[in-house]
Image (spheres, rainbow, N blue to C red):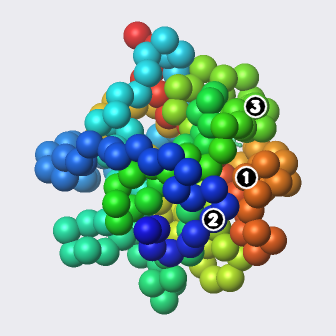
């Protein structure tokens, strides 16, 4: 069962992810020095499950202390992370490190206000509860993803140019929850 928030559709179909490799990667100071938004994505090169696992884990997983990879105000853990795909939306559960299918909708077009978005093979959507610290929590999560992407040579950009009311409606979010930003990822064109 998901710790933090439970949103509509949870548990319809569950996909277990491979364990993240919590070792190695680029030295932290080097990753911070090289972080940048990159908008070139090779649409032909999918993000494999191991890489997806590690992206979700750095954003919102459970770490070696049994804590989230990011801090949350009063440990509310009041954030949710979705993966949008052409065949449906999935919500990530940190404690079980799995994805749970929320619906069969393609909501990527609701995030496509810039041309490069359609080339990205991986789409994350951050959702917060409007009580305390939500935007801050999302910022911690997407920065972790930026640093992981830098370490792995992935392109990524965080984006606010999305249709928030339509996303909230299509995800069936309760009134006190809202989508806030979309993060697309993929391998750069060679
Ligand atoms: C909250 C937030 C919203 C953003 N929204 C968009 C966006 O909708 N589209 C986009 O292309 N970049 C977006 N960006 C990325 C910024 O344009 C980018 O971070 C900025 O130009 C600095 O570049 P850098 O990340 O390479 O340092 C957003 C960044 C933040 C932090």
Helix, strand or loop at label 3? It is: helix
On screen, residue 42 above or below 6: above
Q: Residue at x 41, y 44 (%)?
A: 15
Q: Which residue is mark 2?
A: 7
Return the x and y of residue 81 as percentages of the image width and height.
Answer: 54, 56
Q: Is residue 92 left or right of residue 159?
A: left
- Image quadrant, ligand 1: top right
Q: Residue at x 66, y 37 (%)?
A: 104
**Quarter of the picture holding the N terminus:** bottom left
Q: Residue furthest front?
A: 12
Q: Residues within 10 Å of mark 3 (few under 14, many from 20)?
A: few
Q: Residue at x 78, y 38 (%)?
A: 110
Helix, strand or loop at label 2? It is: loop
Helix, strand or loop at label 1? It is: helix
Q: Is residue 148 left or right of residue 141?
A: left
Return the x and y of residue 189 as percentages of the image width and height.
Answer: 46, 14
Q: Which residue is mark 1?
A: 171
Return the x and y of residue 79 as percentages of the image width and height.
Answer: 56, 68
| Residue 67 shows in this picture | yes
Q: Which residue is mark 3?
A: 109
Q: Is residue 29 left or right of residue 154?
A: left
């Amino acid at each position: 069962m998901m710790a933090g928030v439970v949103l509509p559709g949870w548990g319809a179909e569950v996909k277990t992810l491979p364990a993240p490799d919590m070792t190695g990667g680029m030295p932290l100071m080097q990753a911070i020095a090289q972080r940048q938004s990159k908008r070139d994505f090779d649409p032909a090169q999918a993000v494999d499950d191991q890489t997806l696992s590690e992206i979700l884990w750095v954003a919102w997983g459970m770490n070696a202390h049994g804590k989230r990879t990011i801090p949350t105000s009063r440990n509310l853990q009041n954030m949710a992370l979705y993966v949008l795909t052409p065949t449906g939306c999935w919500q990530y559960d940190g404690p079980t490190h799995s994805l749970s299918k929320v619906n069969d909708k393609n909501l990527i077009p609701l995030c496509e206000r810039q041309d490069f978005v359609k080339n990205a093979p991986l789409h994350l959507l951050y959702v917060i509860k409007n009580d305390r610290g939500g935007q801050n929590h999302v910022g911690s999560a997407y920065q972790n993803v930026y640093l992981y992407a830098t370490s792995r040579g992935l392109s990524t950009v965080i984006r606010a140019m999305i249709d928030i009311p339509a996303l909230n409606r299509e995800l069936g979010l309760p009134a006190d929850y809202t989508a806030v930003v979309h993060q697309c990822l993929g391998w750069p064109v060679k």
